[in-house]
Amino acid sequence: MKRALYGLLAALIALPLCVRVGLAQEDPPTPEERYEALEEEAQEIYDAWREAIREAQKAAEEAEEGAAVPAIPMRPDFSALVPKFQAAARDYAGTDDAIPFLVWLAGNAGKDVNAAALRTLLGDHAASEKLADVAWMMRDVIERFGAEEGTALLKKVEADSPVAAVRAWAAFARLADTLEKNEVGSEAYETAKRELDKVMEGVEDDYLLSEVGQVTVVREKFSLGMVAPDISGVDLDGTAFHLSDYKGQVVFVDFWGDW
Amino acid sequence: MKDQPFALIGVNSDDLERAKKAVADNKLNWRSFQNEPSGAKRAISADWYVSGWPTIVVLDAEMKIRYRGHDGHEASDIAKKLVAEMKASK
């Protein structure tokens, strides 16, 4: 009886609230607000996933030896969210507002959906300056779409993008395979390298510089049998020294950190 | 590997306080470069295009690269072999 009374009371309080909300002419959410709301939902799913991992780890620690332990899901399950991001990407199709939703889909949705999002991102938004923040996503375009379609998508970005770093990422994604598969000094390698050097001029994207270095400088200067460049630096006490101080010995150079 | 023609040189990527603490806490006995001391133009790891940590590079007596990668055991084996070869040829 008492519970029924509370229920009634709640309904009486809630009713005018509902009416008021219903009557007020609410503006539709802006694309930014819509993205933030979806992002928040994604964060909740992510947090729940992390929590599930913690619990599974705890269960595994407490389990008796040989006992089955629950499997830990490889990644958070965003499948319920994907259609919402897709709907938003469709609503804003062709405008810059669609970009964040496509980027999210390209990074988090399942295989076919993320490929479609990346295809739309490069195909429809090649000329957008907003591509600058996600240009690294082009890194494996050839691998994902095959040489023919991948090359076409990247060349479009190279032709249309107003941002030098974006054009450079596209060129790198297009040429990386040629660089990796051909000997340093071969005609194919050197031609691709010259083409890449030209678009890389003045580009200061650290991530791209490092990626380019991995397939060029590392092989040109750090291959087995090559003489390592000297290092002149300071030790942890601030005393200057050179790597070459140890020439004549076998030197084990360990890039380390205490994470 | 004491009294052997062998040197272990670190390149440390932590900030200085953290690096010194790690050395003290773990009684590390090798000398390390600061990867990017304040005022440096470029980190050593950037010059060497090191993309993952830890990375190990083994150099022979002529400073020629004999190993570059992330496998500490393989690197140690190669270094030991090089030291043994050097001693044998003396």
Image (spheres, rainbow, N blue to C red):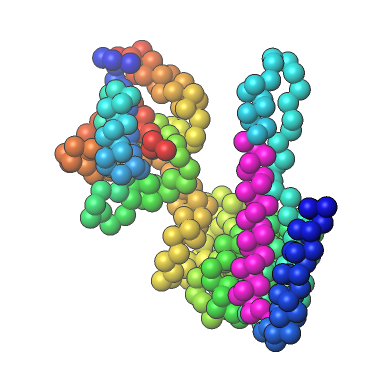
Q: Residue at x 71, y 79 (%)?
A: A21
Q: Residue at x 23, y 44 (%)?
A: A233
Whether A211 is drawn above or below A222: the answer is: below
Q: Can you see residue B30?
A: no
Q: Position of residue A90 (x, y in %)?
A: 76, 76
Q: Position of residue A95 (x, y in %)?
A: 66, 82
Q: Residue at x 36, y 12 (%)?
A: B88
Q: Position of residue A227 (x, y in %)?
A: 36, 40
Position of residue B30 in the picture relative to residue A152 (left or right): left
Q: Given the current orientation, which residue lies at the most extreme bottom position?
A: A25
Q: In terms of depth relative to the viewer, which is nearer, A90 or A56?
A: A56
Q: Which residues are magenta?
A: A28-54
Q: Residue at x 59, y 79 (%)?
A: A128
| Residue A32 among magenta residues | yes
The chief SS type of the magenta part is: helix
Position of residue A176 in the picture relative to residue B2 (left or right): right
Q: In terms of depth relative to the viewer, which is nearer, A251 or A49?
A: A49
Q: Quadrant of the C terminus of chain A?
A: top left
| Residue B22 among magenta residues | no
